[in-house]
Amino acid sequence: MDKFSSLKKLGVSEQEIAVYTALLKHGPSSAAQLSESTNIHRTNVYSILIKLKNRGFVVTKDAGCLIF
């Protein structure tokens, strides 16, 4: 069984899972940092982070730049 099957059943995409697991691994990160660690274009990372935030998976912190 895939360790992310529960997330997939909730409708979380592969890219959303990649960004979410990168946050779990690295802790608070900017979209640029997440883009670099996941190889997902930064503008797509922002869209993914907004989706994850709306679902309650991540929160934002304004520290001069947006940190998730």
Image: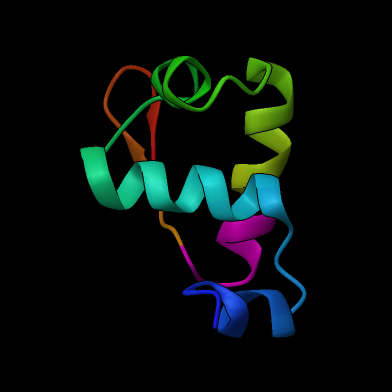
Per the image, is 36 magenta? no
Which residue is depicted at the point 64% across and 32% down?
46
The answer to whether residue 52 is above or below residue 61 is: below
Instruction: Give residue 19's position: percent from left, percent from top.
Output: 51, 43
Instruction: Give residue 37's position: percent from left, percent from top.
Output: 42, 23
Instruction: Give residue 33's position: percent from left, percent from top.
Output: 39, 18
Q: Is residue 67 left or right of residue 16?
A: left
Which residue is depicted at the point 56% across and 59% down?
53
How many marks do you count on the picture? 0
Q: What's the magenta region? A: 51-57
Instruction: Give residue 13's position: percent from left, percent from top.
Output: 74, 58
Q: Is residue 55 left or right of residue 27?
A: right
The answer to whether residue 65 is above or below residue 68 is: above
Q: Nearer the viewer, residue 4 or 55?
A: 4
Q: Nearer the viewer, residue 61 or 23?
A: 23
Per the image, is 53 magenta? yes
Q: Is residue 65 left or right of residue 9?
A: left
Which of the image's four quarters has the N terminus? bottom right
Viewer can see residue 60: no
Q: Is residue 31 left or right of residue 67?
A: right
